[in-house]
Image (cartoon, rainbow, N blue to C red):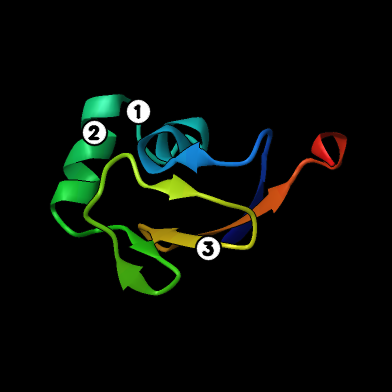
Amino acid sequence: MSRVFVIHGDHIQLDQLLKATGLCGSGGEAHSAVASGQVLVDGNTEMRKRAKLRPGQTVRYENENILLTASHNDE
């Protein structure tokens, strides 16, 4: 399944994205998911819990694809 997530500002941290989308219920759960290699960013395993994600990037976790887009208010 795919969804779009709007970033307000220039980036969002990976752990914050996983919590904001509801894919992880807590920061600890998000950190564990990343540390265990379950999260892909642009098709590559991402091991940095606080990786800065920007519009245009995609994140995959537990059969969910998230496309990051920019808020038009930030332009």
Mark 3 vs mark 2, foreground winner is: 3
Identity of the residue drawn at 51% across and 31% down: 20
Mark 3 residue type: Thr
**Residue type for callout 1:** Gly
| Mark 1, residue position | 25
Q: Give the residue at x 36% y 47%.
A: 51
Rendered-image quadrant of the N terminus: bottom right
Cα distance in 3D space between marks 3 and 2: 20 Å
Q: Is residue 29 left or right of residue 68?
A: left
| SS at mark 1 in the image | loop
For the residues bearing labels 3 and 2, Cβ distance under 8 angstroms: no
Q: Position of residue 75 (x, y in %)?
A: 85, 42
Q: Is residue 50 left or right of residue 54?
A: left
Q: Please tell me which residue lies in front, 31 or 75.
A: 75
- Tag in front: 1 or 3: 3
Mark 1 or mark 3: whose residue is earlier in sequence: 1
Q: Which residue is mark 2?
A: 29
* Of 61 and 40, the residue lying toward us: 40
Mark 3 or 2 closer to N-term? 2
> Callout 3: few (<14), some (14-19), or many (20+) C-alpha neighbours within 10 Å?
many
Q: Residues within 10 Å of mark 2 (few under 14, many from 20)?
A: some
Q: Which mark is residue 58?
A: 3
For the residues labelled 2 and 1, the Cα–Cα distance comes to 6 Å
Locate residue 18: give its quadrant.
top left
Q: Amino acid at mark 2?
A: Glu
Q: From what the image shows, is residue 57 above or below residue 50?
A: below
Query: On residue 65, which mark appears?
Result: none
